[in-house]
Amino acid sequence: MGNLFSSDTSPRMRVACVGDSVTEGFRGMWSAPSDEAYPAQLQRMLGQTWDVVNLGSSGSTLSQDGKDGAGTHIASAAYWQRPQFETLRSQRWDAIVLMLGTNDCKMREHGAGVDNWRGEEHYLASYSALIDVLLQQGSPPAIFVCTSAPSMKDGAFGTSQKIINTVLPRLVRRAVEAAKEHSRANGIFLVDVFAALGGQEVGIVPPGGLTQEFASAHQDPAYPCIYMCDSTWNDQLHPCDRGFTAIAQAVHDAITSWQASINN
């Protein structure tokens, strides 16, 4: 088979990056998303024959029942209710990158005003429902399902560190396996963002969370410190720009591997 992606006259390949604030490029409640958000870096890595669209929406959940807020000011946080989801549903995509789940781990006992965690089976069912919707497009896109970024501190943004770091990575793998089995599609892939950001070594971080001093003393790329903290950023949950680079590289490698398999 010839190279489907090499012709100068071919339409640009379109990639939708779906997610929450980590995808959007969160840099503080009152600041604009970072210009180094991973979709922007992915665009530069993939080049001009690709069109990467950032459909990240801060605070959004995978679950259709997700909430945000506190007291009498609680509203839906479901990605399904965000305008980005309408864009996702209404346009043509060659590839879709999914990374959702962090906000599903918000719980009152960890300082959130809501209880979003509904258990493992609910999370798996939510992923299955979302993937099913995406595969109903006329020409089903390749789907790249990402594990979430690791948490450096319990209670960060009202989330459970234990669920983020020990439950979600396993569940995302199960979601990908189930999607491959039940959809009979060959275009569903796992991207281990958790590992790309050193999540397997998150236990080295002190219980009180990551500090600049600790990060400076632990610069090994196998550790999460360099991906979650730099001289300008450290909020325990969102990557710094080097972390966004690591996410973009992991997604880039998965997409180009898929591309190579099609061209052969």
Image: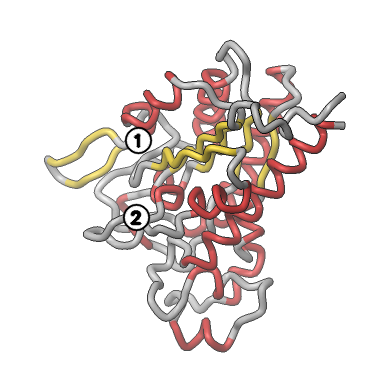
How did the renderer colour the structure? secondary structure
Q: Are marks 2 and 1 in contact (CB under 8 Å)?
A: no
Give the residue number, with chain letter if any, for mark 2.
33
User: Is residue 253 positioned above or below 236 on the image?
Assistant: above
Give the residue number, with chain letter if any, for mark 1.
66
- Residue 198 in the image: state x and y as whole percent: 63, 66
Q: Is residue 257 left or right of residue 231?
A: right
Of labels 2 and 1, the one closer to you = 2
User: Is residue 217 positioned above or below 228 on the image?
Assistant: below
Residue at image coords 46%, 21%: 91
The quarter in which the N terminus is drawn is: top right
Separation (CA) of disc 2 from disc 1: 22 Å
- Residue 168 in the image: state x and y as whole percent: 57, 47
Residue at image coords 33%, 43%: 115
Q: On the image, which quarter does residue 54 sit in? A: top left
Residue projecting furthest to the front: 8
Mark 1, secondary structure of its residue: loop
Mark 2, secondary structure of its residue: loop
Q: Nearer the viewer, residue 195 or 261?
A: 261
Say what amino acid the circle numbered 2 marks: Pro
Residue at image coords 54%, 69%: 227
- Residue 65 in the image: state x and y as whole percent: 35, 30
Label 1: how many residues lie within 10 Å, few (<14), some (14-19) or many (20+)?
A: many
Q: Nearer the viewer, residue 205 or 84?
A: 84
- Residue 165 in the image: state x and y as whole percent: 56, 57
The quarter in which the C terminus is drawn is: top right
User: Is residue 135 positioned above or below 196 on the image?
Assistant: above
Q: On the image, which quarter does residue 173 sit in? A: top right
Which badge, 2 or 1, comes first in the chain's sequence? 2
Residue projecting furthest to the left: 72
